[in-house]
Image (cartoon, helix red, strand yellow):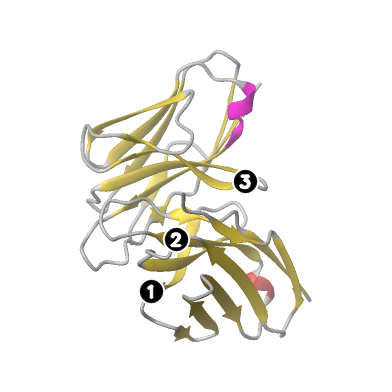
Amino acid sequence: GEDVEQSLFLSVREGDSSVINCTYTDSSSTYLYWYKQEPGAGLQLLTYIFSNMDMKQDQRLTVLLNKKDKHLSLRIADTQTGDSAIYFCAEILKSGNTPLVFGKGTRLSVIA
Amino acid sequence: DVKVTQSSRYLVKRTGEKVFLECVQDMDHENMFWYRQDPGLGLRLIYFSYDVKMKEKGDIPEGYSVSREKKERFSLILESASTNQTSMYLCASSQPGTGSYNEQFFGPGTRLTVL
């Protein structure tokens, strides 16, 4: 079955870049997502990438997709204390009525 | 502003009680989901629904049931609460569509404690 793996913790200094990594097993994924969960809140979509793309950039965020290795990464440039949160990688196998498959989440701690 | 609301942020119940968690979305979405979130386990899908009166089991449906009588409302029911159901419960909704990126919108969560 499908599985999404990511490391549980990451700690960076304010102003440095953060890179959160994710691997997935199903090569038929159509969209891959990064969700952010701030303390005490629900998840919010941060960015997504279509499976035929290699890279997507959105302000401080860069998403890289390596389909051959089934590896997805999220890079946050100039990490701020407000970026401290849990980041979830997720995939969907096809559009329409298929649930997302989430990773366990990476807790990013930003040290001032 | 799109919204998914959950009836309670915090709930404390006793073992054996019947518990109702309510979720309402105002986006006219077809799909609704219930997850539980536990440290180190991430999000696990309990049930989801693609339409009114329809429901599908997720990965961990045991001990839970759901009800979707109206499009905007999706209820999660714990028939007889147990201590291992102490968790954070998250509701989400989405709109399906060919070629859509299927964003799921999440509620703020209900932290349930079963004593």
Q: In this view, does B33 lie above or below A72?
A: above
Identified by mark 2, the residue type is Asp
Q: Do labels 3 and 1 share a chain?
A: no
B100 horizontally vs B75: left or right: left
Determine the chain carrying the residue at label 2: A
Which label lies toward us, 3 or 2?
A: 2
Q: Which numbered tag is attached to residue A26?
A: 2
Residue A81 appears at what percent x and percent y? 69, 73
Which label lies toward us, 2 or 1?
A: 2
Determine the chain carrying the residue at label 1: A
Q: Distance between the residues labelled 3 and 1?
A: 26 Å
Identified by mark 3, the residue type is Leu
Q: How far apart are marks 3 and 2 (CA)?
A: 20 Å
Would you say residue B111 sits in the magenta stretch? Answer: no
Q: Determine the residue positioned at 55% across, 85% down.
A: A60
**In the image, which residues are magenta?**
B83-87
B85 horizontally vs B20: left or right: right
Q: Do labels 2 and 1 share a chain?
A: yes
Q: Determine the residue positioned at 45% across, 18% down.
A: B79
Local SS, label 3:
loop
Q: In this view, does A68 lie above or below B95?
A: below
A92 horizontally vs B111: left or right: left
Residue B16 appears at what percent x and percent y? 55, 13
Local SS, label 1:
loop
Residue that carries the numbered disc 1 in the rendered image = A51
A65 horizontally vs A110: left or right: left
Q: Which numbered tag is attached to residue B41?
A: 3
Determine the chain carrying the residue at label 3: B
